[in-house]
Amino acid sequence: MNDSIMLEARNLVKHFPVSGSKNQVVHAVDGVSFQVKKGRTLGLVGESGCGKSSCARTVIRIYEPTAGQIFLDGQEITNLSQRQLAPLRRNIQMVFQDPYASLNARMTVREIINEPLRAHKVCSNAREADEMIFEMLDRVGLSREHANRYAHEFSGGQRQRVGIARALILHPKVVICDEPISALDVSIQAQVVNLLKEFQEEEEITYLFIAHDLSMVRYVSDDVGVMYLGKLVELSESNEIYEHPLHPYTQGLLAAIPIPDPKAARAKTVSSIEGDIPSPISPPSGCRFHTRCPHATPLCSRVEPVMADVGGGHQVACHLYPQCTPGDSKE
Ligand code: SF4
């Protein structure tokens, strides 16, 4: 496995203006940093509204970053114009959440998969394009007979296979998967995830995988980042985060996963998170989780904990770990 950093965000910020207000903004992403090595998958998890999808869309420059830096394969892409970015888009593609909405209903599957080939002038003639499209249909588990059909003729799982074919036809280095399985039946989810993993093994693709289903994220990710209200609060190797979650928010998220064994469920010591996620327009002071945290102290509402490595590359931002409390604010 190559150890090079393929995708990196440094202190990424994305604020959206609030309509009708001059001063207020939605703090969708607030200083998020991560690195994803070549051929690996970083899963970003959190409740809906935590900023994970905004983060993914900012990384791929669908949204313009408010501040911070983005690097693709060592090249900074933060301030490139859309024109400068166009040739690089070949290397960074996206699989969207809703295969019903993301595929143009008026286009055949052939036309949908041909779009990126045309945009990047990959093929010299239609026959060459068709060969690539048929080969890709075969790889995603569809057949060349499907090429002349329209998206609405397919099931949700088949549509997502078309979405994956469209994203992967250019052999990108990085694929942003924005909740690619959330809209699918449980029985289909594993098939789509396995398909993404197969491509990764064959082509060393780097994935940023956004999801709220923590059990599937464990299966698909090498590393997992947990987001809360625009902030990354914990980041570690996947098994480590599931076996030794450190942040009370991560512990609450894991406690909310249903356990099929009633005995094990009764033995659970951590309860799931109470209350609603606060407004991202005026996030709580200090630690943003303090309004819902069972361990909160006065320090938590006053001082923001910093993200710190508490051992073995396991990073967390919580005052329960002394490394996370800035030196001048220790009580
Ligand atoms: Fe809870 Fe305080 Fe840690 Fe925030 S910093 S998660 S409020 S203990």
Image (cartoon, rainbow, N blue to C red):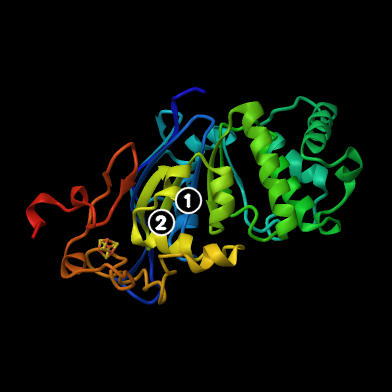
Label 2 close to label 1 by CB (< 8 Å): yes
Q: Label 2 crowding class (10 Å Cα cut-off): few <14, some 14-19, many 20+? A: many
Spatial CA span between label 2 and label 1: 7 Å
Residue 117 placement, left or right of 41: right
First in sequence, mark 2 or 1: give its number: 1
Relative to 231, residue 199 above or below: above
Amino acid found under the numbered disc labelled 2: Met
Relative height, residue 212 to residue 207 (above, below): below
Quadrant for residue 72, please give it. Answer: top left
Residue 311: % across, % down: 29, 39
Residue at 62% across / 33% down in the picture? 200
- Res 290 quadrant in image: bottom left
Q: Look at 62% across and 56% down and name the residue there.
A: 97
Disc 2, SS: strand
> Which residue is pictured at 47% across the width and 59% down the height?
254
Q: Position of residue 145 (x, y in %)?
A: 92, 42
Q: Look at label 1 and name its amino acid.
A: Leu
Vertical comparison of 195 with 4: above or below: below
User: Looking at the rendering, in which quadrant would you find the C terminus?
Assistant: bottom left
Where on the image, by quarter, is ligand 1? bottom left
| Label 1 element class | strand
- Residue located at (70% from left, 28% from top): 122
Q: To which residue does mark 1 refer?
A: 44
Q: Position of residue 301 (x, y in %)?
A: 20, 69
Tell me if residue 324 can be seen.
yes
Residue 28 seen in this snapshot: no
Q: Which residue is mark 2?
A: 227
